[in-house]
C-alpha cells in the first residue's frame, strides 16, 4: 500500500512540475484527521450495514480512494468531511441496508455543510426509524443543507432540535413518512431560503410563526394533511418566489396579505377547501407566472381581479372552484398565458372571441359550465387547439355551422340551430356526412341535439331537405344565393 501511494505521489509531483503550481499538491498530500476518518467509517457503516469495511475499501476517503457521496475540505492542514450523501443517487453510490440506523458518530462530523439521505429508510412496517431528536446542535456551526428525500421508513415527528440549526439555508423533508404538527421553532432558522416539507403526513395548522422566515424563497408544504386557515403572517414572506400548499385540508379565506408577495412566481393552492372568493389583492402579485387553485370551494367571480395586472401569468388554473358570472374579456390581455383552465364552474354568458387573440395560448378548458350562445372563434383557432379547446358540457353553447369544416369543429359542442345557410357545392361534401352530396347541392345547416348524425336525425334531415326543396322556402333560399 505504501509503495502505491508513493508512486502516485511521484506522478503527481511530476504533473505539478509540468502543469501547475504546488499549492494543490500540498492539499492532496495532507492527511485526513484520524478521528474524523474513523467516525466517517462508522457513521456510513450504520447506514449501509456491517459488511461494509471502510478502512479496507477506502483507506484514503478524502484522497486517493474517494467514497461516492463524500466530499471533503481542508481545515488547519487536515481533511474533514463537508458533504455526506447517503443513498442511490449515482450508479456506484452506497445503498442503505434495510435496517439502516443513525449512529452517534454522525454528529461528530462537525465540519458537515451538507447532509442528505435519499431512498435510504425504506420499510415503514418492518424497520421504521425516527430522526434522532438530540445532538443536532453539534452540527449547528456549519450545516447549511439538510435533506431527507423519499424515505418512507422515516416516521415520527420532526425533532424540535432542528430549530437550533441556525446556519441552515435549505431544509428538505420530501416524501418521507413524517407526521405530527409542523414544529413552531423552525422559525429560528432565520437564514432558511428553502423549506420543503411536501409529501409527508403532517397535520394541524401552519404555525403563525412561519411568517418570520423572511429570507424564504421556496416554501412547499404540499401533499400533507395540514388544516385550518392561512396565517396572515404569510404577508411577511416578501422574498418568496414559490409557494405550494396544494393537496392539504386548508380552509378559510385567502389572506389579503397575499398582495405583499410581489416576487412570487408560483402560487399553488389546488385541492384544498379554501373559500371566500378570489380576493382583489391577488392582482398585486405582479410577478406571478402560475396561479393554480383548482378544486377548492372558493366561489365568487372573475370580475374581482384586474387581470391585466398579472401580465406574467402563463398558467391560470381555476377549474372547479365554484365560479359564477361571466368570463371577462380582460383575460385576453394576458399576453403570456399558455394554459387557461376554467372548467367545471358555473360560468355563464357568452364567450368573447377575443380569447383567440391570446398569442401564447395552447390549452383553454371551459368545459362543464353554463356558457351560452354561439362560439365565434375561427377555424384556424379550432385547428390549432384541437381537444385542448374544451367547451363540451355547456348545454346552451353551439358553434355556427358552415364556417368550419367538419374535422375541426369544437369537440363536444353542438351546431347552432337557427340559421339556414347555403354553401358552395365543392365545400359542402365535407360537412357532416358524405351522404349529403347525393341528394342536393344545397347544404342545409340544421340544429342537432347531438353532434353525431344518427339514424333518426338522418331521416329527419332528409325530410326537411325534401321539404325545403319542394316547399315554400325555395324562393327564400334562392334569394339568399343571389
Ligand atoms: C475492517 O477490516 C480490518 C482488517 O481487514 C479489521 O481490522 C477491522 O476491524 C475491520 N473493521 C470493521 C469495522 O469491521
Ligand atoms: C424581489 O426581486 C427583486 C429583483 O429580483 C429584488 O431586487 C427584491 O429585493 C426582491 N424583493 C424582496 C422583498 O425580496
Ligand atoms: C351551479 O348552479 C346550479 C344551478 O344554479 C346549482 O345547482 C349548482 O349547485 C351550482 N354549482 C356550483 C358548483 O356552484
Ligand atoms: C344555465 O343558464 C340558464 C340561463 O342562461 C338557466 O336557465 C339554467 O338553469 C342554467 N343551468 C344551470 C345548470 O345552471
Ligand atoms: C360526395 O362528394 C365527394 C367529393 O366532393 C365524393 O368523394 C364522395 O364520394 C361523395 N359522396 C357520395 C356519397 O356520393
Image (tube, grey):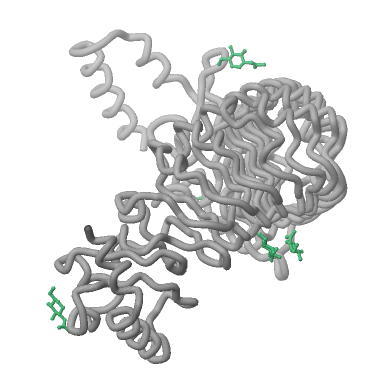
Q: Nearer the viewer, residue 327 or 18?
A: 327
Q: Residue at x 78, y 48 (%)?
A: 274
265 sits to left or right of 58 = right
Q: Could you say where residue 208 lies in the image, as x and y percent from the top left?
A: 87, 33
Q: Nearer the viewer, residue 77 or 379?
A: 379
- Which percent across, then down, holds residue 339? 48, 45
Question: Is residue 392 in view?
Answer: yes
Is 478 left, or right, of 263 in this rendering?
left
Query: Which quadrant of the picture is home to ligand 5?
Result: bottom left
Q: Quadrant of the C terminus?
A: bottom left
Instruction: Determine whether 175 is above or below 10 in the image.
Output: below
For the N terminus, the quadrant is top left
Residue found at x 14% / y 67%: 426
- In the rendered view, would you say 445 is above or below 106? below
Residue at 42% from the left image edge and 90% from the top image edge:
456
Q: Quadrant of residue 209?
A: top right
**Residue 141 image point, x, y percent:** 71, 21
Using the image, determine if residue 81 lies above or below residue 320. Answer: above
Q: Is residue 287 left or right of residue 337?
A: right
Q: Position of residue 122 (x, y in %)?
A: 62, 61
Amino acid at each position: 500500500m505504501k509503495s502505491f501511494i508513493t508512486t502516485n505521489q511521484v506522478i503527481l509531483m511530476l504533473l505539478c512540475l509540468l502543469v501547475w503550481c504546488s499549492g494543490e499538491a500540498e492539499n492532496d498530500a495532507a492527511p485526513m484527521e484520524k478521528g474524523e476518518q474513523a467516525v466517517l467509517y462508522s457513521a456510513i457503516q450504520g447506514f449501509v450495514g456491517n459488511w461494509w469495511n471502510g478502512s479496507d475499501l477506502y483507506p484514503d476517503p478524502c484522497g486517493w480512494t474517494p467514497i461516492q457521496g463524500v466530499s471533503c475540505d481542508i481545515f488547519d492542514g487536515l481533511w474533514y468531511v463537508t458533504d455526506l450523501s447517503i443513498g442511490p443517487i449515482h450508479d456506484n453510490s452506497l445503498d442503505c441496508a434495510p435496517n439502516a440506523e443513525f449512529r452517534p458518530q454522525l454528529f461528530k462530523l462537525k465540519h458537515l455543510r451538507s447532509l442528505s439521505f435519499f431512498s435510504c429508510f425504506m420499510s415503514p412496517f418492518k424497520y421504521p426509524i425516527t430522526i434522532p431528536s438530540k445532538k443536532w446542535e453539534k452540527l449547528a456551526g456549519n450545516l447549511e443543507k439538510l435533506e431527507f428525500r423519499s424515505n418512507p421508513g422515516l416516521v415520527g415527528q420532526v425533532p424540535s432540535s432542528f430549530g437550533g440549526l441556525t446556519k441552515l439555508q435549505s431544509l428538505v423533508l420530501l416524501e418521507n413518512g413524517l407526521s405530527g404538527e409542523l414544529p413552531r421553532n423552525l422559525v429560528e432558522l432565520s437564514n432558511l431560503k428553502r423549506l420543503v416539507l411536501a409529501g409527508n403526513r403532517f397535520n394541524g395548522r401552519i404555525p403563525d410563526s412561519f411568517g418570520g422566515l423572511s429570507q424564504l424563497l421556496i416554501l412547499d408544504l404540499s401533499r400533507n394533511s395540514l388544516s385550518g386557515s392561512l396565517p396572515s403572517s404569510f404577508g411577511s414572506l416578501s422574498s418568496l418566489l414559490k409557494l405550494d400548499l396544494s393537496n392539504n385540508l386548508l380552509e378559510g379565506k385567502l389572506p389579503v396579505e397575499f398582495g405583499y408577495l410581489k416576487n412570487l412566481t408560483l402560487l399553488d393552492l389546488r385541492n384544498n377547501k379554501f373559500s371566500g372568493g378570489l380576493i382583489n389583492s391577488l392582482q398585486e402579485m405582479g410577478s406571478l407566472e402560475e396561479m393554480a387553485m383548482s378544486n377548492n370551494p372558493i366561489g365568487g367571480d372573475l370580475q374581482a381581479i384586474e387581470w391585466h395586472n398579472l401580465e406574467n401569468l402563463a398558467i391560470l388554473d381555476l377549474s372547479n372552484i365554484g365560479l359564477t358570472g361571466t368570463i371577462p374579456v380582460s383575460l385576453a390581455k394576458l399576453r403570456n398565458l399558455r394554459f387557461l383552465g376554467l372548467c367545471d364552474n358555473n360560468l355563464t354568458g357568452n364567450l368573447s372571441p377575443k380569447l383567440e387573440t391570446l398569442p401564447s395560448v395552447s390549452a383553454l378548458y371551459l368545459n362543464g359550465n353554463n356558457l351560452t350562445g354561439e362560439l365565434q372563434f375561427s377555424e384556424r383557432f379550432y385547428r390549432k387547439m384541437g381537444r385542448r379547446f374544451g367547451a363540451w358540457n355547456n348545454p346552451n353553447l353551439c358553434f355556427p355551422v358552415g364556417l368550419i369544416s367538419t374535422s375541426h369543429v369544437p369537440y363536444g359542442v353542438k351546431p347552432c340551430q337557427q340559421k339556414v345557410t347555403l354553401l358552395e357545392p365543392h365545400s359542402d361534401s365535407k360537412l357532416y356526412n358524405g351522404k349529403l352530396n347525393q341528394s342536393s347541392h344545397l347544404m342545409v345547416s340544421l340544429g342537432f341535439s347531438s353532434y353525431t348524425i344518427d339514424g333518426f336525425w338522418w331521416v329527419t334531415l332528409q325530410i326537411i331537405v325534401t321539404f325545403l326543396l319542394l316547399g315554400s322556402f325555395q324562393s327564400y333560399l334562392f334569394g339568399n344565393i343571389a
